[in-house]
Amino acid sequence: MSSTLQAPATGATPASLEAAFARHLEECRQLPDWWLEMKRSAFERYRSLPMPSRKDQSWRFSRLRGLELDRFDFNSTTPAADHAGLIARSNLVSRTAGSMVFSDDRLIHNQPVAAELAAQGVVWEPIADALQQHRELLQEYFMAQDPRLGSEKFAALHTAFVNAGCLLYIPKGVEVELPFIAYHWASVAGGTVLPHTLVIAEESARLTLVDAFFAADRSAPHFACGFNHIFAGDNAEVQYYSLQDWSRRAVGFQINSLVTGRDARIKSLGINTGCSHFRGEHQSLLQGAGSHVDMFSLSVASGEQEMDQRTLQRHLAPNATSDLLFKNALSDASRTIFSGLIEVAEAAQQTDAYQTNRNLLLSPEAEANSLPGLEIHANDVKCSHGATTGQIDESEMFYMLSRGIPLNKARELLVFGFFEEVIGNIDEDEMADNVRALIERKFHEDASAQ
Amino acid sequence: MNTLDIRNLSVRVAGNEILKNFSLTIPKGEVHAIMGPNGTGKSTLAKALAGHEDYEITGGDVLLDGTSILELEPDERSRSGLFMAFQYPSEIPGVSIANFIRAALQARLAEGEELEATKYYKRLYEKMDLLSIDRKFTARSVNEGFSGGEKKRCEILQLAMLEPKYAILDETDSGLDIDALKVVAHGVNTLRSQNMGVLLITHYQRLLNYIVPDRVHVMYDGRIVKSGPKELALELEANGYEWVRDHATATA
């Protein structure tokens, strides 16, 4: 149970983290001083903070310890010859309001917003470009929410090395129908990716954004540490989708932070299929009265994958609602951890907050851990949490068989039915179909690997 | 040969013998009804024929057009032409009716053969219209959140789409109001043909006013104690199941 997590040897001997950071600073020396200064102090903070251990409440059950980061190359660069192929594979959604493709943290393709949206003040830029023109936005919002679920050290690491990411700013009252999408590719074996997404929706703005995390070679090791921060202003409406399909040998962190203004609505939906060890942290801060947050997640784990997810629904304002549904399907000897907390402050009266974790065990060796929690300081609230772990329902299976559907097909239909409760909440039909295809591919890869 | 032939079938559930030397022959083209009090083994018969693993066959045989089906898995029994409409159909979240029935039909095709989507939907909509099922239901998850009547209509829709050789309708009338019952009965009557044998299992005579059987069998304590023409149902209705009990005791 106490296996040490190590990056697989990659052949090359990457420099120490200190040397990698010095080189990173050198590479971005043309960026503004305040940005570089922030990076330097973040790197110091990274070094001074202890590596999390399973003794910490927020890392209970997690196998992650002794992560030897200097085995990964923090200065990896994708060969130019590979760019076109990766851009062609960045095809999750065909009609977008704007898209960017990054590979090993370098921007390799950028479809800017239409002139009409730009004229209304919509900003969709790589963060490196936005540092000059949108300094105030970045200084106010970049990494402005501290991680509350255990990854302070990785937040510092992310800030120190961040190079890839996008800033999306939607001004007051502007509604954008088509989705924005950022693709992040991990390409070089043994490399690192630190994707960042910052979304600021002003009052009554509306938008959809997709983050896609893909691996060029789905069997190559890499390290990923991504953050996304979403700020929905008063009455704004944001849909955020993330699709984590890093390689099967990757170690990945993804920290998701949502903040609502008055009457704002955010829907966050994540799909996880990749990584040998994945850690997802999802925190929602309902600080606007009457706001609403939906948090959905679907993780499909197989082999010896570990998917470790921690969630927080933090209600600070009255009359706000939050609804969380995290589903895990576990095959082989995979394991998942779900730890969720609903926290209701004294002032947050008339809160409605729900938390549901459902685990489908498809193998006797799979292990699902569930740690739901409530911490309520207000006296007039409706909160509930529930966790279920079970196998395929026998009466449903018999019903399928009794219609002549063979066992394997029946099982596939039932498992995919389990997924639909999450996938069905993807409003973009094309993306929903692509998500289904991606999960199907994983299933068939697993089947052929056996 | 054109029969579903149940011969001296004995079935045990959780250690108790429920069916005892049960015999019944249903020819194609006929509708047979089995009536009987609760706990007499009617649903056990249905589940055992469908191949549910909790129902242990301890004796006898079941021949579908002359071939024993007892060694077949539940899905193989279905593909060989047996259909069961469940008393309590399962809800299957996330699997649409259209995909469910499609998978069942696809399973009946030869390897490499694909169901043609447009033809499939055309036929599906025809059958839905026949059963007064809103076409929007195709996208809904199987039985999820359905009323009792909707579930039963969905069962008959599957029957209509799969065109089995023999259909067993287990308490298809239970929980239905008179309007829903008429719709279901109309569906079954439309599907009645020389190519299908039907076994109606019911507790109440009411269903048989709408689906008129060729033969009625009275079941008691795991076996058939009396068989007769459709009028037997009325006789049973008039005299009650106590009459059956007395009759069974007298002949035992």
Image: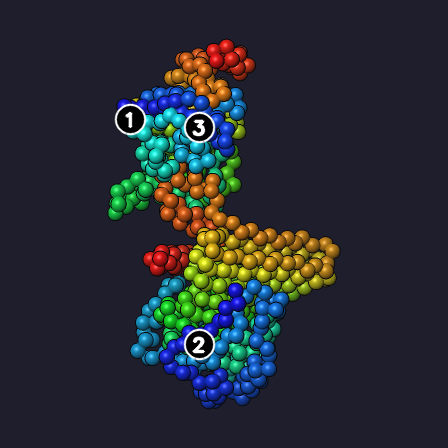
Left or right for B157, reference A172: left
* Residue shown at the point (46%, 35%) measured from the top left: B54
Q: Is residue B32 above or below residue A85?
A: above
Residue mark closest to the camera, 3 vs 2: 3
Per the model, the C-alpha gap separating discs 3 and 2 is 63 Å
Identify the residue position indicated by label 2 in the image. Answer: A192
Identify the residue position indicated by label 1 in the image. Answer: B66
Closest to the observer: A60 or A28? A60
Is the C-beta separation of discs 2 and 1 under 8 Å? no
* Residue B11 disc label: 3
The amino acid on which the numbered mark 2 sits, given as a three-letter code, is Thr
Q: Is residue B96 above or below residue A199?
A: above
Helix, strand or loop at mark 1 = loop
* Residue A67 disc label: none
- Image location (x, y in percent) of residue B241: 53, 16
- Image location (x, y in percent) of residue B202: 47, 23
| The C terminus of chain A - image quarter | bottom left
Per the model, the C-alpha gap separating discs 3 and 1 is 21 Å
- Image location (x, y in percent) of residue B87: 48, 31
Location of residue A325 by image quarter: bottom right
Left or right for B237, reference A98: right
Q: Chain of mark 2?
A: A
